[in-house]
Image (cartoon, grey):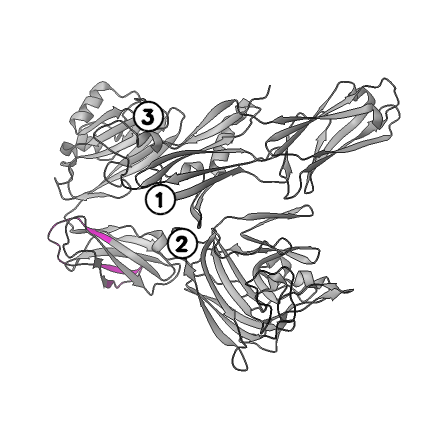
């Protein structure tokens, strides 16, 4: 019997933030938040498979939140949803989620997707569940008993335009198909050998207008008593069944461990006797079964044997009383749904923290719930006479040659603050004065200093300085690398048809539209020695009108980071982008541009396409996130950050949600001089909450080549592309 399941991932904070404890308040005021739950309708047939599948799908789930301006939040993995909710500005949003593997045809891999809309207002707490329903078309095959008597070695092949699955014999399995755009048909072919004489037998048909989240069962029957096996005696009927939901399997996140009114990831700093009471909350999505504390100083501070103890699981009452008397107490608080065993408060009382002498004390906290999920955190008490302390360097603010140092005031009486920093291993410190928000350097004041001139991919260390006296504590950070693009001087080529910009095809980084024009034996992007800035070669991008037997299209001379994927008639399918993890501020390229008058025009052009006057060239750079788009053609599939299909006018949009940073230069006239012009293209970062994962660079002699418009004979020469950091 079929069992359908929903894998449900519940954010812990939904219960934490609505907790009924009166002393602590987790819910924020004056801002809008989204408490998001992701659910995946898996339609699992084997119940024993559910637990492993919940983990796998939960880890792979991609969750995008966007508004009318594009992508605003992106998460990979349900466990990475913020436990305290997602802060969002007022407005309308759409949340989309995807999980699983989007493959053409498979007996195992499936693809799920869901979409919901919602609105955020100031001070609101919006709760939303996005259910990812199966997006595949599902097919299976059933045979009646007599089929085995009249047909041997039989198979059923079911296919769409991209791929197929072969069901051998009585295969009791569902097949999962991702239907290409515009394809809503499955074909089937029954093949085997006639039992009577061993001759080959085939029968074929189609299932039209197939829909996702629907199972199509091919029921194969043989009803004729005649031992002659003919196609007419087999009847194949298709049952259509919508995949429904019948019960729920819960995916729970691991317990959350957080400090009350302080960040548990940062040390609690103070002088002897001044730290006071500190509390930690441990919150589980299910009942807490074990909460363990460990610290090397426990025997001395609490008067117990051993460095660790479990507050919940089997602790001796006498030992627990000693711990409580020593200054560590606990209490459970009810959650919003009335559960009394999921929210534990651990108090490090004043009579515990007052015993701490100068130095660092590390308390490890491990929490395990009834589902076996475990979380760990570290609480550090730093008792010191220092007036300031180092704060961690923000990884997103640390570039190849600069970063922002941070410190905070931990003791009254500070009059001036700054930092010492140096390359790790260097003997001399460099001092830099800090910037503070206010003149009063009270306890808790954060001060910063932006430092530049650092070396890429290098370890540095720093310490705060108060009134000219450096802190004894030394912290470290590492600058980002400053990668350059492979073959950026265009020295390496494969000189054939098509001409390839690389040493060999297996090491491609750049490509061009040559592949389309090469079908007419014309290369529009080629190496040249006529104009060279450095080395022996540069790239020549010549716009042309390749044709054969009077059939052709205008093609802009071009080079791009990515790969030419396929030629669809006279149109190209291109994948822009390659993996890349740097954050340059500009791109420098040497260009010689020789435009001619526009003499070729496409059809059905948008108003912004220039159709007369001098041709225009364009070079742009885009830094992209790690998302990919899939494209398929004639049984092949590819995934690239940007997919270009000129036939369907699927072109690059520099305002798309996956664009982290962008810069461009449009050439409206011939470059000056007899050689190259140095061109520097600034890169504008539109998002600073994420680092790039891919890069796209596109150089085109005819700016509107995607619309088959430009000047036949326009030439752009490029050499020595360099990323500036």
Q: Quadrant of residue 172?
A: top right
Q: To which residue does mark 2 refer?
A: 687
Q: Is residue 631 above or below residue 175?
A: below
Residue 656 placement, left or right of 385: right
User: Can residue 147 be seen by looking at this rendering?
Assistant: yes
Q: Is residue 422 magenta?
A: yes
Q: Position of residue 118 (x, y in %)?
A: 42, 38
User: How far is mark 3 from mark 2, CA to CA?
Assistant: 41 Å
Q: Is residue 50 above or below residue 179?
A: above
Q: Is residue 605 magenta?
A: no
Q: Nearer the viewer, residue 80 or 210?
A: 210
**Secondary structure at numbered mark 3:** strand
Residue 391 placement, left or right of 126: left
Q: Position of residue 257 (x, y in %)?
A: 31, 34
Residue segment shown in magenta: 407-431
Residue 8 placement, left or right of 180: left
Q: Quadrant of the C terminus?
A: bottom left
Q: Quadrant of residue 490?
A: bottom right
Eye-nearest disc, 3 or 2 = 2
Dots 2 and 1: beta carbons under 8 Å? Answer: no
Eye-nearest disc, 2 or 1 = 1
Q: To which residue does mark 1 refer?
A: 90
Q: Position of residue 220 (x, y in %)?
A: 75, 24
Q: To which residue does mark 3 refer?
A: 290
């Amino acid at each position: 019997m079929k069992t359908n399941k929903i894998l449900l991932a519940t954010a812990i904070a939904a219960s934490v933030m609505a907790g009924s404890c009166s002393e602590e308040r987790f819910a924020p005021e004056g801002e809008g938040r989204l408490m998001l739950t992701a659910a995946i309708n898996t339609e699992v047939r084997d119940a024993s498979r559910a637990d492993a599948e919940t983990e796998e799908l939960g880890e792979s789930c991609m969750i995008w939140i966007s508004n009318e301006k594009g992508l605003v939040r992106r998460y990979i993995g349900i466990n990475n949803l913020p436990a305290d909710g997602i802060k969002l500005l007022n407005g309308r949003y759409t949340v989309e989620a995807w999980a699983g593997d989007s493959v053409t045809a498979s007996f195992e891999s499936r693809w799920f997707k869901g979409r919901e809309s919602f609105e955020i207002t100031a001070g609101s707490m919006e709760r939303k569940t996005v259910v990812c329903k199966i997006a595949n078309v599902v097919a299976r095959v059933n045979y009646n008993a007599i089929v085995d008597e009249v047909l041997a070695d039989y198979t059923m092949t079911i296919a769409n335009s991209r791929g197929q699955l072969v069901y051998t014999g009585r295969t009791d399995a569902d097949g999962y198909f991702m239907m290409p755009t515009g394809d809503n048909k499955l074909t089937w072919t029954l093949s085997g050998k006639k039992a009577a004489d061993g001759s080959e037998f085939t029968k074929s048909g189609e299932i039209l207008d197939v829909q996702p989240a629907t199972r199509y069962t091919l029921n194969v029957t043989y009803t004729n008593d005649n031992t002659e096996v003919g196609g007419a005696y087999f009847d194949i009927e298709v049952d259509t069944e919508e995949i429904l939901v019948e019960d729920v399997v819960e995916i729970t996140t691991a317990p959350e461990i957080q400090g009350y009114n302080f960040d548990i990831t940062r040390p609690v700093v103070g002088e002897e006797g001044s730290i006071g009471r500190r509390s930690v909350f441990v919150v589980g999505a299910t009942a807490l079964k074990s909460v363990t504390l460990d610290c090397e100083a426990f025997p001395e501070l609490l008067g117990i044997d051993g460095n660790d103890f479990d507050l919940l699981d089997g602790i001796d009452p006498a030992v627990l009383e000693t711990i409580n008397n020593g200054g560590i107490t606990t209490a459970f608080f009810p959650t919003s749904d009335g559960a009394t065993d999921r929210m534990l408060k651990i108090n490090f009382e004043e009579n515990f923290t007052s015993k701490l002498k100068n130095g660092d004390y590390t308390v490890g906290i491990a929490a395990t719930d009834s589902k076996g999920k475990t979380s760990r955190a570290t609480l550090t008490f730093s008792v010191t006479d220092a007036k300031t302390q180092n704060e961690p360097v923000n990884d997103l603010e640390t570039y190849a040659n600069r970063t922002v140092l941070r410190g905070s005031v931990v003791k009254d009486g500070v009059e001036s603050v700054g930092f010492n920093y140096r390359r790790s291993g260097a003997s001399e410190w460099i001092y830099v004065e800090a910037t503070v928000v206010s003149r009063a350097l009270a306890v808790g004041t954060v001060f910063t200093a932006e430092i530049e001139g650092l070396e890429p991919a290098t370890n540095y260390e720093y310490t705060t300085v108060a009134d000219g006296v450096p802190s004894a504590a030394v912290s470290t950070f590492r600058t980002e690398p400053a990668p350059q693009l492979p073959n950026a001087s265009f020295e390496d080529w494969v000189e054939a048809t098509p001409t390839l910009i690389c040493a060999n095809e297996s090491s491609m980084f750049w490509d061009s539209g040559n592949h389309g024009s090469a079908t007419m034996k014309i290369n529009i992007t080629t190496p040249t020695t006529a104009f060279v800035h450095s080395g022996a070669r540069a790239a020549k991008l010549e716009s042309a009108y390749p044709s054969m037997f009077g059939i052709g299209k205008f093609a802009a001379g071009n080079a791009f980071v990515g790969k030419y994927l396929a030629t669809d008639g006279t149109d190209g399918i291109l994948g822009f982008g390659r993996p890349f993890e740097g954050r340059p501020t500009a791109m420098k390229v040497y260009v010689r541009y020789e435009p001619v008058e526009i003499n070729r025009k496409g059809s059905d052009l948008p108003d912004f396409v220039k159709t007369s006057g001098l041709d225009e060239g364009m070079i742009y750079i885009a830094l992209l996130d790690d998302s990919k788009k899939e494209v398929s053609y004639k049984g092949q599939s590819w995934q690239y950050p940007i997919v270009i299909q000129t036939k369907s006018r699927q072109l690059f949009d520099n305002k798309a949600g996956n664009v982290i940073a962008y810069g461009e230069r449009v050439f409206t006239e011939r470059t000056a001089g007899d050689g190259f012009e140095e061109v520097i293209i600034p890169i504008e970062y539109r998002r600073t909450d994420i680092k790039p994962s891919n890069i796209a660079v596109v150089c085109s002699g005819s700016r509107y080549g995607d619309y088959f418009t430009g000047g036949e004979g326009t030439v752009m020469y490029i050499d020595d592309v360099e990323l500036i950091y």
